[in-house]
Image (cartoon, coloured by chain):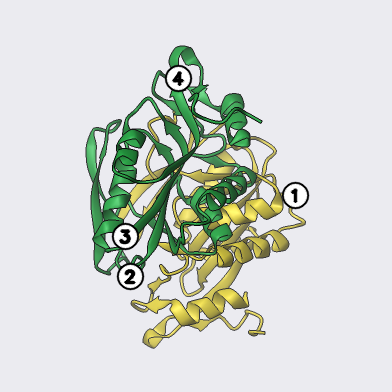
Chain colours: A yellow, B green
């Protein structure tokens, strides 16, 4: 997705060989127009997938997920990293290990909002080792619902989360795939269509 | 705002005299069309306020804030409740006391994204005692920016956050003001225009 890649090239900050900071438009400050374009792009890529619900995880997944939901005309649910005091329903939960924080946290979704038969499109901002996406997949399965696909804004192709999810048979659509962050530079994966 | 009040009446769950659960459309599952309507309504109410940035707080403020930002054509920044590992900039911070959790947490915003001279519209999902809104006001002031106004989706008028903010001179626009939650029922404040 050209607009996204352009934004990454102009505003992304390479902090190390594996950390890209995009907090000027995605993770802290949010560019609402880019989010709308991202939502339209996900909606277009998954338009045949009969999506009934979108599932994301707080906080940076919410903006792209809501825009996708608006275009696909379905509700969006965000998994909580910390339990809400008013979330008294039965919960679908999954553990997520954070490689950066070196700790496991439980994410949770009320079982009211994902039901058997739902076709759930999972949306998240980043895909690296796949911990968050796998946790969301676990929650969809716990609900006896179906994973319609996984939409990722930025995939770090040099980590193995995307590879593992695709090997499991999930359709993973990433709007920007980063091959390397070596030498302080963003290099997109060759498999991506050329910038146009 | 009629669509919001209708949604509160049909889907809101009164958990106690002071707790209203709206997690089917705002706090956990999100109705993207209602969020868009809310965004347009805030944008309309603050259209003369020369807003340059929108500031909200993760997670439930993000969806209405992004939709408002889209309509007003400005970026949105969400304050973090927990520090990001890649958020290495100088931070604007404020303490927020949670009456429900009985603990104080520090919220933070990178000082890159709110600058002196900015006209900042603060958006949040709920206003009760005003702790979150006051924390966001503190952050705007730390940046030597100006509070253009405060937009709240649901104000609990029986708690004093809105009253205190208005007495301080801030323009607070709440799309639904709840007078009481007594006897398990939602009663909107009389000062609201009649449903039309």
- The subunit carrying tag 1 is A
Q: Which mark is residue A50?
A: 1
Marks 2 and 3, how far apart at CA: 8 Å
Which of pointers 4 and 1 indicates the residue nearer the eye? 4
Marks 2 and 1, how far apart at CA: 41 Å
In percent of the image, x 24 and y 33: which residue is there?
A: B102
Q: Which secondary structure lies at badge 2? A: loop
Sort mark 4 into few (<14), some (14-19) or many (20+) by Cα contacts within 10 Å: many
Q: Which secondary structure lies at badge 1? A: loop
In percent of the image, x 36 and y 36: which residue is there?
A: B162
- Using the rendered view, name the quadrant where residue B116 is placed: bottom left
Q: Position of residue B103 (x, y in %)?
A: 22, 37
Badge 4 and badge 2 in a common chain: yes
Which of pointers 2 and 1 indicates the residue nearer the eye? 2
Q: Which mark is residue B112?
A: 2
Q: Which mark is residue B109?
A: 3
Sort mark 1 into few (<14), some (14-19) or many (20+) by Cα contacts within 10 Å: few
Marks 4 and 2, how far apart at CA: 41 Å
Q: Which secondary structure lies at badge 4? A: loop
Of labels 4 and 3, earlier in sequence is: 3
How many badges with numbers are in the image?
4
């Amino acid at each position: 997705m050209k607009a996204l890649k352009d934004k990454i090239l102009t505003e992304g900050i390479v902090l190390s060989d594996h950390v890209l900071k995009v907090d000027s438009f995605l993770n802290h400050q949010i560019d609402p127009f880019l989010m709308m374009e991202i939502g339209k792009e996900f909606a277009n890529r998954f338009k045949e997938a009969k999506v009934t619900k979108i599932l994301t995880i707080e906080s940076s997944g919410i903006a792209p997920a809501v825009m996708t939901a608006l275009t696909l005309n379905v509700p969006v649910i965000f998994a909580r990293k910390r339990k809400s005091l008013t979330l008294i329903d039965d919960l679908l939960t999954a553990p997520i290990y954070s490689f950066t924080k070196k700790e496991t946290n439980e994410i949770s979704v009320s079982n009211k909002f994902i039901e058997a038969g739902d076709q759930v499109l999972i949306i998240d901002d980043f895909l690296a080792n796949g911990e968050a996406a796998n946790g969301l997949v676990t929650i969809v399965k716990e609900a006896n619902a179906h994973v319609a696909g996984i939409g990722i804004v930025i995939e770090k192709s040099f980590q193995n989360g995307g590879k593992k999810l695709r090997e499991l048979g999930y359709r993973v659509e990433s709007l920007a795939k980063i091959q390397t962050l070596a030498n302080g530079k963003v290099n997109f994966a060759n498999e991506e269509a050329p910038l146009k």
